Structure formats: C-alpha cells, structure tokens
Image: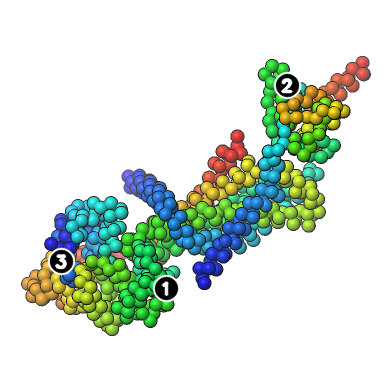
Amino acid sequence: MQNKNTEITVGMFVVAGLIAIFVLAMKVSNFAEFNDKEGYQVVAEFENIGGLKVRSPITMAGVRVGRVTNIRLDPETFNAMVTLKLSSEYDGIPIDTAASIYTAGLLGEQYIALEAGAEDESLKDGDILDLTQPAIVLEQVIGQFLFSKAEGDE
Amino acid sequence: MIETIRSLGRWGLGSFERLGRGHLFLVKILMGIPELFLRFSLVIQQLYSVGVLSVFLIIIAGLFVGMVLGLQGYNTLVDFGAEESLGVMVSLSLVRELGPVVSALLFAGRAGSALTAEIGLMKSTEQLSGMEMMAVDPIRRIMAPRFIAGLISMPLLAAIFSAVGIYGGFLVGHGLLGVDDGAFWSQMQVKTDWYGDILNGVLKSVVFGVVITWIALFEGYDATPTSEGVGRATTRTVVHSAFAILGLDFILTALMFGG
Amino acid sequence: MPLIKIRDLHFYRGDRAIFEGVNIDIHRGKITAIMGPSGTGKTTLLRLIGGQLRPDKGTIEVDGQDVHKLSHRDLYELRKRMGMLFQSGALLTDLTVFENVAFPIREHTQLPESMVRDLVLIKLQAVGLRGAHDLMPNELSGGMARRVALARAMTLDPMMIMYDEPFTGQDPISMGTLVNLIHKMNDAMDLTSVIVSHDVAETSEIADHIYLLSAGKVIEQGSPVQLKRSTSQWVQQFMQGLPDGPVPFHYPGNTLEQDLLERKDAV
C-alpha cells in the first residue's frame, strides 16, 4: 500500500515536471514556430541592416509572417544578405514584394516589414527579394538634417 | 613558522586526497547505474524522498520569486515606457538564471542535507558496513539510486519553478499592475528561445542536480561516524553545494550566453 | 586445515600500530574467541577478515582464499558465505524486522515471495522473534536487535559467523539468551564462530579456543581452562578482572608528588 502511494505521487511529480517543460516550450518560448519545417526561405539584399538580428520578426501589414534566420555579408557587393524564413501558411506572397527595415518605436527592436507587390507569381523557396529599403540609422538622419539646415541658412 | 607551513601542507594534501576519493566515489556510482535499469523500483523510492518532498517548497518559492520579479520589473520598465516587455524580463530571468539557480539552492538545502544526514546516519549505525558484509555493495544499492533520483528530479523541479514563477509574474503584472496580457505573452514568446534559453536552462539544472547529489552523497559517505560528524557533514553539504552552484552557474553562463 | 589462517598480520592506523605480527588459526566447527582490553583492535581484526580493511603486511586466508588478493566480485562471493553480527545490530532502520531478515535473500536470489516468507519466518523462529516480524528496528531492545541481526546473518546459511562484542551492554537475561543462541547455532548448523569480546565469563563459557590480544600481539592462547591456569600475570589480571597488575591502574606519567610540586611552582 505504502509502495503504491509512493509510485502514484512519484508519477504525478514526473508528470508535473514534464508539463512545466511543455508549458515553457509552447507558451513561453518560440518552440512551436521553430519546429515549423514547412516554411520556405527567401533572401533579401540590404545596403544596411542597422540593428537587425537573427530571429528578428518579419511582418506584413503588422502581422507576424516569419523570422530572420541568417545574416551574412556578400564578399563582392558588400551588402548584407538576409535570409528570411516565412511561414508556409503565407504561400501567396507576390514575387515583387518589397522589404524594409523599420524600428518598433523610437528605441525598440528592428524588424523587417514586407509590402506586397502586384505580380501574380508567388515567392518560392530560394527566391531573392529585389526591392529593399535599408534600415534608417538615426545618426545619419540627424546628420543629414543638420547638414541641409546649414546649407539652407547660407 | 615551520608548524604553520606544515599544517598548510597537511591541509592541502588532505584536500587533494579527499578530492581524489570523491572522484573515485563518483566513478563507482556511475558503474553501478546500469544495473538500476533492472531494479527501477529503488529509484522510484528515492524520487519520492528526493523529488516529491521538495515540490511544495519549489512551487511556493517559484511563485513568490516570480511575483517579486513582476513587481520590480514593472517599476523599472515603466520608466522607459516598456512595461509590455515585462513578460520577456520575467521569463528570461527565470528560465536562464533564477529557475535553475534558486531551485538548486533550495534543493541543496532540502534534499541534499537530508541525503547527507541519512547516509551519515547509516554509516554511523554500521548499516553501510553491515551491507558490505552481506555482500551488498552500498554504493550500488544505496548511492546509485539516490544519484539518479537527484539527476532526474533537479531539472523537473527547476522547470516547475520557472513555470510557476512566470505565472506568478503574470499574476502580478496583469492582475495587479494591468499590463496587457497579449503583450505579456507574445513579447515573451518572441524573445525567449527554445534552444538558446530554455534547453540551456534545463542543461544547467541537470549539471546542478549531478553536483549537489554527488556532494551530498559523498559528504554522508565520508562523514566521521558520530552524531557531531554527521552534523558537520550536513552543513558542509549545504555550503559546498551553494559554492558549487554559484561558481558553476557563472562558468555555464559564460559558455552558453557569453559568446 | 583451519578455516581462517592469519599470518604475520601488521596493521597501522596513522603512526599507531594496531597489529604487529599476529598469527591466528580459526578451526572449522569451533567457537573461537578473540579477547583483549578495549582499544586493542578486536573489531578491526573482524573488518580485516571481512576484507573491509587492508593489512599493511601479512595475509589473511579464509577457506583457502587470500581475502585481500580477491577481485571485488570474488570478495563479494566470499562474503555471502561469511555472516557478521555488528555490535549495534546494524539493522536497516527503514525496513521492518521481516524485511531486514529478507534483505539478503531478496538481494542475492530470485526466490518466489512465498519461499522468502517461509525462510524468514524459520530464521526468526530460531532466534525466538517470529512474533516481532512486523516491528521496526527502533521498537526493539538492544538484545532483540542483535537477535534479529543474527537471524539475518544466517539467512544465506553461511559457513561462519563473526560476532562483534555480542554481550556488551546486555542485561543478564538477554546475555544468557545470546550465549545460549550462539552455542546452539554453532552446533546445530555446523558453523564456525568467531567471537570478539571482553566479557570473560560469558565468552569462556562457550568458547573452544581463546586468543588473548594486547598491544598488537597475541599474548596467550589456549582453551578457557588452559588460560585460567596460565602463570602469566597479565593473563591472570585480564581473566579475573583485577584492577591493578601488569596493566597499571594509573595512566603512565609523572608521579603525584612531581605534579603537585610543579603546580606549586607555576602558581
């Protein structure tokens, strides 16, 4: 009897621990989307990616559609080659879609926003996005603003 | 002067000898593990006294640590208008650091000290010798099941601690301070990585589980077989485990998140 | 050929010599007592025979095998045939009396539960504690704990049993029970018994042969009758429990006068 109760409580303990890990996986972390092997990858070339990082979100009309999976420098053009992983749910994105890097709020993290194009053909795995707009670097903007102000005064 | 140097030397040699014995002890335990698969009921018995009896403490502690994180995090974040990031802050602090570390410290105090006292008592009442003379190897029969139980319990306890803590943070953040629940969970999901954060946290707690149980069992096994000796061994278990946990946590964090 | 043959045994604890050249033969089917004042390492001797300690020099052979040259596995096989009764009984405190006696059977055999039960009850019956099989060790008196431990030591039908101070701290009744039991067991089961003790009267009552140890050496050996007739003053002092003799009443040191005078100078 003693033994049976012990086994039951130990069983409950192990189940509780596994549930905790499951909750951490599904509710707290990005485990669910990480395992989405159905997604497809496209590459976008940017002049400047600012503070974009691997795992930064990709949105379309403000809706999450994917995540950055890789960033590297092209050795010839010296542009940043960013690999985007898009969820297979969204498989009808036009091939002439434009990608821009924005900042969420003034100090927030950077993300890629896609703007749908007009073509009938859809993006496929391995395609390259041509229309890109680089990240806005705050110091550059301020520098340009001051420069044009100074020129205007002359 | 010579006497001081001599005692220093004796202390050094003694420590090295103990360290060596401790490692041999671990090797012997590891060699005893395979046959446990045939007698898993021994491990279940120990999972009860090592794991189940610590659950209540872990849940309560996790809840309060999470609630405090919610309060303090909110007070800091609200200055930057970033209170929506409360979820991220709570989850990352818990999953990466506080979950594994605090639950390991509590585990050392609750289960580690109990293990040392139990083994020490068995030694001082000649139960271990008695077993040896009955041709039962106490390392395989007594130590190995407890070691495995510690190894299994620690990550489960740490996961329970983190999960409960995150709900504690959510209760305070959403229920008390009015952070939007959608923002709380979604930001958390975006920023908390399954491999990088959660699995690394679990890995940390596995390491802590091994180290605490090892220290606790060895201190008991190596205790001077008197009630005073067992008492001192129990204290040493808690102190050494705490040092080991905090030191290893730094090393593991540097390896996992430093690069 | 003796069952246990100890030759030129040396054992040191730190700088202190416990044994220096001890030779002992323990013969099959006999009760051999090893006696000596407290602190002469009698219990250490049992641990050396059981292979729990290693001698610094010399050999111990049990049933023709050198205990300290055996592999871990062979040593454990040998121990299955050696029973040992610890001074405290060394019962497992978290198991009942029944489970304690069943412990070696469950560890070493795959016997079905009904057979385990029969075996345990027979052994408990032999020590007169069948009715106590449901008790926990902390509910037993010291004498009862030793009897349970004796039942446990016999479950695997060993060839020999070693008793570590079996009579110490017992009231006269349980002392008598134990003396009787040890004697009966030895004859009925064709055991070889080794008793370590300093209780002269009880031990000489049942021992066939006695070794007297002191200061790391065998001082005297023989049957109880021979020892009582020994001309050695030391043996006489030990066997009769005289307060003063070759083993002085006073711990060695300065004379009382010297100490008193010194004290006076210091003040």
Percent across and percent down for residue C178 are: 27, 78
Residue A63, compared with residue B14, is above or below; it is above
Disc 2 target residue: A79
Q: Earlier in the sequence, mark 1 or mark 3?
A: 3
Q: Marks 1/2: CA distance?
A: 77 Å
Identity of the residue drawn at 40% across and 64% down? B122
Compare residues C183 and C52 and report the one nearer the observer: C183
Disc 1 target residue: C96
Q: Marks 3/2: CA distance?
A: 93 Å
Quarter of the picture holding the N terminus of chain B: top left
Q: Marks 1/3: CA distance?
A: 35 Å
Q: Can residue B181 be seen in this view?
A: yes
Residue C112, compared with residue A56, is above or below; it is below
Compare residues C220 and B186 and report the one nearer the observer: B186
Q: In this view, does C250 lie to the left or right of B91?
A: left
Q: What element carries label 3?
A: loop
Q: Are marks 3 and 2 on the same chain?
A: no
Query: Do residues under tags 3 and 2 come within 8 Å of each other at their CB atoms?
Result: no
Amino acid on which the number 1 mark rests in the picture: Thr
Give the numbered dot on residue B165. none
Percent across and percent down for residue B192 are: 69, 44
Percent across and percent down for residue B216 are: 46, 56
Q: Residues within 10 Å of mark 3 (few under 14, many from 20)?
A: some
Disc 3 target residue: C27
Residue B129 picture quarter: bottom left
Q: Is mark 2 on a helix, strand or loop?
A: loop
Q: Residues within 10 Å of mark 1 (few under 14, many from 20)?
A: some
Amino acid on which the number 2 mark rests in the picture: Asn
Q: Is residue C238 left or right of residue A102?
A: left
In the rendered image, the residue lying farthest to the bottom is C173
